[in-house]
Amino acid sequence: MNGPRSDPPRVLFLYTELAPYFLACVEQLVRDHGAQVRIVRWPVNNEAPFDLRSSGSVELSERMDIDDRELVRICSGWRPDIAFCSGWVDKGYLKVCRELHRDGVPTVMCSDTAWRGTWRQWGAIFGVQPWLRRTFTHAWVTGHPQFRYAHYLGFDKKRIRTGFYAADIGSFAPLSEQLDGPKRERFPHRFLCVARYIPTKGHQLLCDVFADLCDQGHARDWELWMVGTGVLHEQVIRSASGSHPRIRHLGFVQADRMPEVMAQCGVFVLPSTYEPWGVVVQEHAAAGFPLVLSDAVGAGERFLSEPLNGYWSRAGDDASLSGALTRIIGTSDEALITMARHSAELGQAWGPADWARTVMELIEEE
């Protein structure tokens, strides 16, 4: 496409579970480029019941209310300039993309799945390639391991983008200003973990390790706060370590209330055993939090530069996690402020405006 667009671009998203950061990116696309946006979405996850609202310029449709045939009719009839689809989990979404692909509309597979070389992934490479080329023209993924997987699936490297997830920088970057105010005067000696209480997030391990540091006298005056809910919530908070007096469980917190919680904490921790990306990492980096991440957390590739702004631990390894937390505890407040500033620099380097520009580049590329 040559020259500036004379009409508003129409952008279709066939999505699974929406999150506030995604809607922030969509709203930026509308503001910066005048896009008309239509989103078809799955129901809200009970373990992350965000109160999701959007402007009148974004049209939301519930996937569960539309059968496959009607979905194809509606989406094709809307005549989008581009369509983005959450992976290949929804067969109806794939039907829409194939129909649009045949009509010459660019269709983009979006994914946070990292290449791990498992037998299932090798099977997927040979199983999906024949129809993948008839369904998608591009892939938009989160990081380098995801880029590698998309390339193995048959996408030309020139048709793969990274940076599909972007935090709502406008909501979190202002918190970094506290590094020149309250946090500089007294850095909060509180670790903060924000994650669903499910097996892969490592809540029990984190509680066990931190409680042990407290009982051994190695935690000094530090505390641990945990935000989230999920199937393991009650089990973790009732466990011997989870009920430790210096561990606080806040339950689920809506996005607009998170800055209030974050202002009272100092260092972000995510000890997951499986975490393809984790936008929450960028959110806390942008807010000026040093990081302690397991090596299973994908977002660490972009937002953790050890030892400049935090430390890695081996996923599922209590001694490694204990060592990383101990290094933070033993760091002076002045040094923690320096680490926090580096986090803010990394976290604020990619946001909704960059995301929106990528959407437009993909439209104009065709």
Image (tube, rainbow, N blue to C red):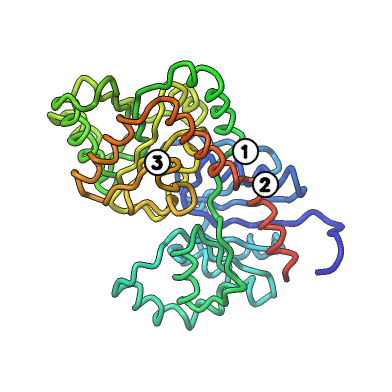
Of pointers 3 and 2, the one earlier in the residue sequence:
3
Q: Secondary structure at mark 2?
A: helix
Query: Can you say which quadrant of the picture contains the C terminus?
Result: bottom right
Disc 1 vs disc 3: which is toward the camera?
3
Q: CA distance from mark 2 to mark 1?
A: 17 Å
**Is the residue under label 1 in contact with that under label 2 (CB below 8 Å)?**
no
**Is the residue under label 3 in contact with that under label 1 (CB below 8 Å)?**
no
Q: Quadrant of residue 345?
A: top right
Q: Position of residue 240 (x, y in %)?
A: 12, 29
Q: Position of residue 295 (x, y in %)?
A: 33, 53
Q: Residue at x 72, y 56 (%)?
A: 10
Q: Residue at x 54, y 65 (%)?
A: 109
Task: Decide if residue 188 is on the left or right side of residue 95.
Answer: left
Q: Position of residue 242 (x, y in %)?
A: 19, 29
Residue at which label 2 appears: 353
Viewer-side residue, 145 vs 227: 145
- Disc number for residue 54: 1
Q: Secondary structure at mark 3?
A: strand
What amino acid does circle 3 point to?
Answer: Gly
Q: Residue at x 50, y 79 (%)?
A: 154
Of pointers 1 and 3, the one earlier in the residue sequence:
1
Task: Decide if residue 355 is on the left or right side of residue 34.
Answer: left
Q: CA distance from mark 3 to mark 2?
A: 27 Å
